[in-house]
Image (tube, rainbow, N blue to C red):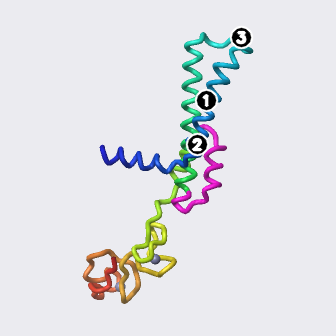
Amino acid sequence: MNQAKSHFRSELAIIPPVAGAIAVLVFALMQIGLLGVLPRYAKDLPPMPWWALISLCGGIVVGIIILLVGYVNADSKRRGMISLLWTLFVIFVPKGLGFIAYFLLRKPLLIPCPNCGTEIGSDFRYCPKCGHALTPTCSHCGRSISFGYACCPYCGKSVAATATS
Ligand SMILES: [Zn+2]
Ligand SMILES: [Zn+2]
C-alpha cells in the first residue's frame, strides 16, 4: 500500500512544472469566464450554487486532463517513444481513447546499462553502445539462457562460466 503510494507520487513528480502552471491558469480562467463573465450574458443558466459547482468540477476535470497530457509527454520521453507524436495523439483523440491507447501501447521503461549507464530498452540482450551482454548467452551456440543454468538447454554443453551480471 505504502509502496504503491510512493510509486504514484514519484510518477506524479515527472509531470513537467509547465503543465502544472497551465492547468492552474486554465482552471482560474475557466472560473472567471464561467462564474464572472458568462452569467451577465446568458440568462438560462442553472441557479448559482449549482452553476458554481458545475464550473468547479469542469475546471478540475480540464486541469486533470492537462496534467495527464504533461505526464504522457514526460513519460513517453523517458521510454524512448516519439514524445511529440504521443502528446498530440492523446490531445486530439477524443473521449480519453488516446490516453487508453497510450497506456496500453507504451513501451517498458528504459533501464541503465550496468556497464556504461546508457539508457536502454528492458528487452535488449546487448547494450547498443558498449556491447555489454545483459542476459547470459551460451558460449557455444550463442542463444540466450537464464542465470543459474549449468548446461545450455539448446545445445547441451556446459555453460557454468558464461553467466554475466
Ligand atoms: Zn553499455
Ligand atoms: Zn548452447
Q: Secondary structure at mark 3?
A: loop
Determine whether label 2 and label 3 are within 8 Å by CB: no
Q: In the displayed structure, does residue 153 sit left or right of residue 57?
A: left
Q: Is residue 102 above or below residue 47?
A: below
Looking at this view, is 120 or 108 the one in front? 120
Q: CA distance from mark 2 to mark 3?
A: 35 Å
Report x, y in % for residue 46: 62, 12
> Which residue is drawn at the image coordinates 54% and 37% (left, top)?
64
Q: Secondary structure at mark 1?
A: helix
Q: Quadrant of the N terminus?
A: top left
Report x, y in % for residue 79: 51, 60
Q: Amino acid at mark 2?
A: Leu
Looking at this view, is 24 or 160 the one in front? 24
**Which residue is label 1 attached to?**
28
Q: Quadrant of ligand 2?
A: bottom left
Asked which quadrant contains residue 165, the reply is bottom left
**Which residue is label 3 attached to?**
43
Q: Amino acid at mark 3?
A: Lys
Q: Nearer the viewer, mark 2 or mark 3?
A: 3
Indicate which disc, 2 or 3, sits on the residue closer to the N terminus. 3
Q: Nearer the viewer, mark 1 or mark 2?
A: 1
Q: CA distance from mark 3 to mark 1?
A: 23 Å
Q: Nearer the viewer, mark 3 or mark 1?
A: 1
> Which residue is drawn at the image coordinates 37% and 81% (left, top)?
137
**Residue 97, labelled with which disc?**
2
Indicate which disc, 1 or 2, sits on the residue closer to the N terminus. 1
> Which residue is drawn at the image coordinates 47% and 60% (left, top)?
108
Looking at this view, is 3 or 23 the one in front? 23
Q: Secondary structure at mark 2?
A: helix
Q: Provide the residue span drawn in magenta.
A: 77-95
Q: Amino acid at mark 1?
A: Ala
Q: In the displayed structure, does residue 38 sit left or right of residue 133?
A: right
